[in-house]
C-alpha cells in the first residue's frame, strides 16, 4: 500500500494525462464509428498530446511532429546493460592479466608479493572507477597457485626422503638375502612391501584447488614412516623443518581463504629450502 501511494505521489501527472489520453482515444473510436471524422481528428489530437505529456519526463530529446524522439529511461537502461556487459569483459581481461602474471615463470622469477600487489592495484583501480566487480573467484584461483608454491617443495622433499630410505632398505635386502638370492619368496615379499610405500604425492597443482594438500602430503609422510618401521624396522627421517611446516600449512589451508603474511610469501618464494 505504501508503494502504491508513493507511485501515485511521484507520478500523478503521468497518471492524469494517461487517463485523459485513454478517454480521448475512446471518444475517437466512437466518433469514427458514427462517421464524425472532424470530431474524431480533434479528439485524437488531444489523445496524442495527453499521452505525449504523460511521458514527457522520459524523453531525452524531441524533434517535432516529424517525429523524432528518444526515451531517456530507455537510454538509461541501455547504458546500464552496456555497463554490465563491459564489467564482464573487464573481469575476463583482469583475470587473464593476473593469471598470466601468476603462472608466467614463477620459478625464480619475481616475488609473490609483486603478484599480490598487482591484484590489489587492479581491484583499487576498478573501485576508483566505481566498478564493483567480484574478484573472489580470481583470488581463490591465485590462492590455489600460492598454496601449490608453498607445498610443492615440501612434497618434493618428502618424496626424496622416502626414495633415499627405499634405497637404504634395498641395501639391507641385498645383505639379508645374499647374491645370488637364496630365499626368493622372502626377497619378493620384501620388495613387494617396499613398492607399496608411496613416495610421491600426485597432482599437487590440481589438488591445491579443492583439497588441503599440506594435510595430504603430511599423511603420505606419516604412512610411509609407519610402513618403514613396521615392515623393515627402519626409521624414516625427513629434513629438519619439513613436518613442522606442513603442520602449520595444513592448519592454515583448513580455514581458506588464508591470510597471506610476509613469512608465507618468503616460504612460497623459496623453492629450494628443503631439497636434499
Image: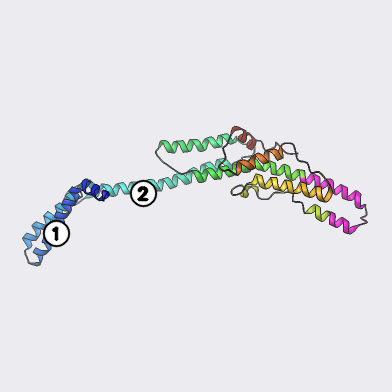
Q: Is residue 54 magenta?
A: no
Choose mark 1 or mark 2, whichever is in front. 1
Q: Which mark is residue 41?
A: none
Crowd rating for badge 2 (residues with CA inside 10 Å; few <14, some 14–19, many 20+)? few
From the viewer's perspective, tell me whether residue 267 is left or right of residue 98: right
Q: Position of residue 140 (x, y in %)?
A: 54, 44
Instruction: Please name the residue that numbered disc 1 is placed on.
Output: 25
Q: Nearer the viewer, residue 247 or 121?
A: 247
Mark 2 element type? helix
Q: Position of residue 37 (x, y in %)?
A: 7, 62
The image quadrant that residue 47 belongs to is: bottom left
Instruction: Please name the residue that numbered disc 2 is placed on.
Output: 81
Q: Do labels 1 and 2 touch, CB within 8 Å?
A: no
Residue range (magenta): 162-190
Q: Residue furthest top?
A: 262
Q: Position of residue 34 (x, y in %)?
A: 7, 67
Image quarter in which the C terminus is found: top right
Q: Main secondary structure of the magenta part?
A: helix
Q: Residue furthest front?
A: 1
Of callouts 1 and 2, the N-terminal one: 1
Q: Position of residue 138 (x, y in %)?
A: 52, 44
From the viewer's perspective, tell me whether residue 225 is left or right of residue 210: right
Q: Is residue 120 visible?
A: yes
Mark 1 element type? helix
Relative to residue 2, is residue 150 depicted above or below? Answer: above
Q: Residue at x 13, y 61 (%)?
A: 26
Per the model, the C-alpha gap separating discs 1 and 2 is: 35 Å
From the viewer's perspective, tell me whether residue 183 is left or right of residue 89: right
Q: Is residue 180 magenta?
A: yes
Amino acid at each position: 500500500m505504501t508503494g502504491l501511494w508513493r507511485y501515485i505521489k511521484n507520478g500523478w501527472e503521468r497518471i492524469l494525462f494517461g487517463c485523459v489520453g485513454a478517454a480521448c482515444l475512446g471518444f475517437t473510436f466512437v466518433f469514427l464509428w458514427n462517421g464524425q471524422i472532424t470530431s474524431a481528428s480533434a479528439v485524437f489530437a488531444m489523445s496524442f498530446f495527453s499521452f505525449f505529456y504523460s511521458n514527457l519526463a522520459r524523453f531525452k530529446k524531441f524533434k517535432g511532429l516529424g517525429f523524432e524522439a528518444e526515451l531517456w529511461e530507455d537510454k538509461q537502461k541501455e547504458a546500464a546493460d552496456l555497463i554490465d556487459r563491459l564489467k564482464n569483459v573487464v573481469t575476463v581481461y583482469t583475470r587473464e592479466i593476473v593469471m598470466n602474471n601468476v603462472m608466467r615463470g614463477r620459478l625464480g622469477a619475481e616475488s609473490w608479493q609483486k603478484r599480490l600487489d598487482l591484484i590489489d592495484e587492479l581491484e583499487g583501480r576498478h573501485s576508483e572507477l566505481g566498478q564493483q566487480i567480484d574478484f573472489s573467484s580470481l583470488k581463490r584461483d591465485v590462492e590455489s597457485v600460492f598454496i601449490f608454491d608453498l607445498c610443492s617443495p615440501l612434497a618434493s622433499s618428502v618424496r626424496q626422503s622416502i626414495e633415499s630410505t627405499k634405497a637404504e632398505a634395498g641395501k639391507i635386502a641385498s645383505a639379508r638375502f645374499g647374491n645370488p638370492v637364496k630365499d626368493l619368496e622372502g626377497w619378493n615379499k620384501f620388495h613387494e612391501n617396499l613398492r607399496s610405500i608411496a613416495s610421491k604425492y600426485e597432482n599437487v597443482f590440481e589438488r591445491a584447488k579443492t583439497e588441503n594438500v599440506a594435510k595430504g602430503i603430511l599423511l603420505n609422510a606419516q604412512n610411509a614412516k609407519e610402513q618403514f618401521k613396521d615392515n623393515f624396522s627402519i626409521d624414516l627421517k625427513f629434513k629438519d623443518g619439513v613436518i613442522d611446516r606442513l603442520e602449520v600449512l595444513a592448519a592454515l589451508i583448513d580455514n581458506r581463504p588464508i591470510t597471506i603474511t610476509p613469512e608465507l610469501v618468503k616460504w612460497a618464494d623459496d623453492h629450494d629450502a628443503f631439497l636434499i
